[in-house]
Image (cartoon, helix red, strand yellow):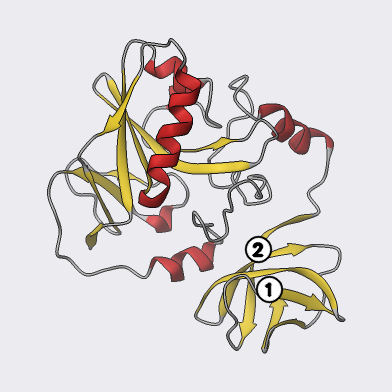
Amino acid sequence: MGVQTNDRMVLKISGADAKRFLQDLVTNNLDQGGLIYAALLTPQGKYLFDFFILKQNDTWLIDVKSDCAAALAQRLTMYRLRADVVIEDSGLSVQRGVGDLPDGAVTDPRHPALGWRLYTLGISDEPTVDWDAIRVEHCIPETGIELIADNTYILEAGFERLNGIDFKKGCYVGQEINARMKHKTELRKGLVTVAVDGHANVGTQILSGGKPVGTLFTQSGGKAIAYLRFDRAKGDMAAGDATVRLIS
């Protein structure tokens, strides 16, 4: 099954310098081929945008959340300087689905449960998929919910597990901070899937023994994605009127 998604926009990057331009900016390696999940960071290593990149003939498509597309294009233009790079709307739409791949579709690189994506001028009227349930089950962060611009560190958000970062590709914006977090520190905070009894709004603070330990995000089927400080996240925790527990 599949459906057109109206909350995505597909930018097109073209020009003689397009590949090198993107390679020097994003967290993943464009040489791996296929659909690539990546992010653009601040120089201080914090998340700004996440997106998918796909080579199509001599151009590169960037599949990004629609309400972030203009800001991403503006940020890319800032980095372009005198490079031979053109940034424009591709006019394509995004279809997503699970099950058998339609002609031209590519698998989502973050997790097998996320199915496929198709870039097309067509539309689909097929049934929708409960993407939140899939995201919560596999702890997949979403733009603007768990992934917060100028705040999130992508390693804490699971980008290594989601195939969204390459530690061998060389320099890119924010690379030094992420390399240091990978090789010189142990993550003390991050996103996890938790059990939740009750409901609390996205962004509700999680407390343990009256002390803040994290934040509750997307909820589905008695589970939720939460950002937690691991050393304090123990036993029953409270998020508003809901009870939160780590899943063993």
Q: Are marks 2 and 1 in contact (CB under 8 Å)?
A: yes
**Which callout, 2 or 1, points to the residue nearer the camera?**
2
Q: Kindly identify the residue that appears in the image at 62 percent across and 23 percent down.
A: 168
Along the line of sight, the residue nearer the viewer: 147 or 116: 147
How crowded pointer 2 is (Cα within 10 Å; few <14, some 14-19, many 20+) is rated as: many
Looking at the image, residue 94 sits to the left or right of residue 226; the answer is left
Q: Quadrant of residue 173?
A: top right
Q: Which class describes the residues within 10 Å of circle 1: few (<14), some (14-19), or many (20+)?
A: few
Image spot of residue 64 (x, y percent): 39, 44
Q: Nearer the viewer, residue 232 or 74?
A: 74
| Image x and y of residue 60, in percent | 32, 27
Q: Quadrant of residue 131?
A: bottom left
Vertical side of 155 occupied by 34: above or below: above
- Residue 20 vs residue 170, the one in the foreground: 20
Q: Quadrant of the C terminus?
A: bottom right
Residue 166 sits above or below residue 145 on the image: above
**Residue 227 vertical placement versus 62 (above, below):** below
Which residue position holds label 2?
Answer: 192
Circle 1 residue = 247
Is tag 2's residue or tag 1's residue first in the polypeptide sequence?
2
Q: Amino acid at mark 2?
A: Val
